[in-house]
Image (spheres, grey):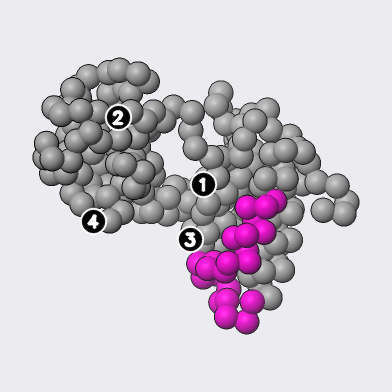
């Protein structure tokens, strides 16, 4: 069981925090010699497999890392252009990690805004007044859980459908937000959360939730 990611959305629908906490099992890392026996092409600013499948690598997978260095779009984290680097025989043998294309920052912002709108629509569709809005969406591979505070901040967790204790986790995240973001004199309401203590305590809470499935009264 696993918790995949956490989103915090402000009352205007803006994404103010996001954390991915799970590496998909579909990722595959292999060491290649020259020439590369996969056809790679640039699509939507990502380097994708266009032809050739082997050892868990599939058409449509993106290049996620080269020699342990993360790839962001078409460049490595240290500034190398991916296709140019992989086209040079002098750089082989090379270790490449492939997997499902990761969401870009802009895509995450857009999805947060879309969920905010769906949440509002869900509230308006309710036959009764005072609807809480969308609290959970379920698919065959994950569940989306949402907790909205009285001030309109939404805490969203994507988790394995079998993961227990998410309601307690959402309230724990709210507690961490109150303690380490709201009480931070340098933090402005509704703005992106950039606080090391918030990061540390959130990651610890996710670890506890994954292992125990819930929080006790003293957590």
**Magenta residue check for 55:** no
CA–CA distance in space, label 2 to label 3: 40 Å
Q: Position of residue 37 (x, y in %)?
A: 18, 22
Image position, residue 78 (x, y; %): 27, 56
| Mark 3, residue position | 14
Q: Nearer the viewer, mark 4 or mark 1?
A: 4
Q: Earlier in the sequence, mark 4 or mark 1?
A: 1
**Sequence-wise, which precedes: disc 4 or disc 2?**
2
Label 2 crowding class (10 Å Cα cut-off): few <14, some 14-19, many 20+? few
The x and y percentages for residue 51 are 20, 22
Q: Is residue 97 visible?
A: yes
Res. 122 in view: no
Q: Nearer the viewer, mark 1 or mark 3?
A: 1
User: What secondary structure is found at the residue carrying circle 3?
Assistant: loop
Query: What residue did someone put label 4 on?
Result: 79
Find residue 20 and name its label. Answer: 1
Dot 2 and dot 3 residues touching (CB under 8 Å):
no
Q: Residue at x 55, y 45 (%)?
A: 21
| Residue at mark 4 to residue at mark 2: CA–CA distance | 21 Å
């Amino acid at each position: 069981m696993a918790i995949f990611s956490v989103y915090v959305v402000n009352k205007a629908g803006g994404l103010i925090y996001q954390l991915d906490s799970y590496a998909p099992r579909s990722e595959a890392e292999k060491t290649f010699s020259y020439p590369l026996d996969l056809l790679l092409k640039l699509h939507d600013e990502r380097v994708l497999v266009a032809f050739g499948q082997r050892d868990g690598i599939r058409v449509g997978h993106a290049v996620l890392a080269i020699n342990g260095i993360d790839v962001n779009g078409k460049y490595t984290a240290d500034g190398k252009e991916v296709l140019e680097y992989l086209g040079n025989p002098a750089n082989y043998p090379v270790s490449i990690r492939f997997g499902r294309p990761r969401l870009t920052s802009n895509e995450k912002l857009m999805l947060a805004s879309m969920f905010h709108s769906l949440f509002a629509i869900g509230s308006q569709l309710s036959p009764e007044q005072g609807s809480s809005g969308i609290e959970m969406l379920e698919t065959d591979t994950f569940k989306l859980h949402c907790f909205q505070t009285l001030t309109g901040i939404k805490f969203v967790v994507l988790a394995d459908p079998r993961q227990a204790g998410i309601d307690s986790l959402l309230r724990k995240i709210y507690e961490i937000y109150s303690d380490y973001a709201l009480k931070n004199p340098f933090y402005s309401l509704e703005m992106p959360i950039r606080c090391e203590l918030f990061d540390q305590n959130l990651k610890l809470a996710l670890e506890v939730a994954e292992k125990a499935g819930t929080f006790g009264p003293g957590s």
